[in-house]
Amino acid sequence: MSDVRPILDGHNSLIVGIANDQSIAYGCATAFRAAGADLAITWLNDKARPHVEPLGEALGAEIMAPLNVENPGELEALFDQIGARWGRLDSLIHSIAFAPKEDLQGGLLDCSAAGFARAMDVSCHSFVRMAKLAAPLMKDGGTMFAMSYLGAERVVANYNVMGPVKAALEAACRYLAFELGDKDIRVHPISPGPLATRASSGIKDFSRLLNDAASQSPLHELVDIDDVGSACAYLASPYARRITGGTIYIDGGANIVA
């Protein structure tokens, strides 16, 4: 990504959700770093750390820390660390989602109440909690991103419980954009086309989604993590200072095709 201009010089960005070098969050991290941003990144747990920490080191991340949003106190500790080290934050990227496998792979009617609640907490409400902690650090304004998918607004076979959950996430982004707009904080729900990430491996017949996306989108190409990262870097820059709240599709135009 050597052709990216340093449009984010002096920018501090927290990127949550890197699992490996195929993660959407990693595509965002590389794009933001190439654009001049300083990075804070997280890993989920001790099992994930050996896969994520070397990526952060290679990117020169100034802050690296564990974050499991289901563990009490970890989110607050992370933002305390950011406040102590940087004193401010310019962007937040939330790229995490989870549903228990048995609830994800069954239809919505068969999803348990506990599984639905857990999917909603990790995949949606954690973004609201992050936004509440991030906003006071965005002293000169900022940008928040949450990763969604087309299944939030139309039925996608086998997406199941994650459809309603992502719909809630997009709605949360709209309401946060409204509430935080007077602080010059912009909020973007990002809807990439299907990507072959570790998270997507839990979706039944995911390869069919990839094939359909490539064949049906106007550009007839799949997007990749660099496409998502570059678009988010632009949206975090002053060039996009009047854009907020609406879902941004990075899918080769697939969302316009019935």
Image (spheres, rainbow, N blue to C red):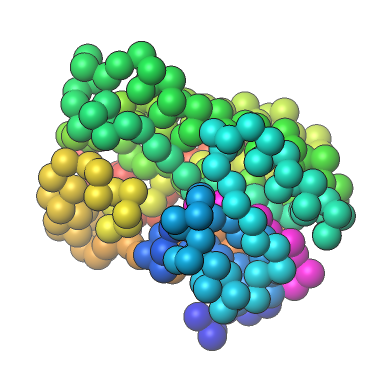
For residue 155, say whether it is visible.
no
- The quarter holding residue 68 reads top right
Report x, y in % for residue 225.
40, 64
- The quarter holding residue 69 reads top right
Seen in the image, is 23 located left or right of residue 100? Answer: right
Residue 8 is covered by the magenta coloring: yes
For residue 105, say whether it is visible.
yes
Seen in the image, is 6 located left or right of residue 147? Answer: right
- The residue shown at (80%, 35%) is 182
Report x, y in % for residue 205.
13, 45
- The residue shown at (27%, 26%) is 103
Report x, y in % for residue 43.
53, 55
Residue 75 versus residue 229 in the image, above or below = above
Residue 202 is covered by the magenta coloring: no
- The residue shown at (51%, 61%) is 49
Foreground residue among 246 and 24: 24
Report x, y in % for residue 166.
41, 32
* Residue with the most extreme front position: 46
- The residue shown at (55%, 67%) is 53
Foreground residue among 79 and 108: 79
Foreground residue among 131 and 35: 131
Residue 102 versus residue 29 in the image, above or below = above
Q: Considering the image in quadrants, where does the C terminus appear?
A: top left
Tag count in the figure?
0
Q: Which stretch is magenta? A: 7-17
Residue 149 versus residue 108 in the image, above or below = below
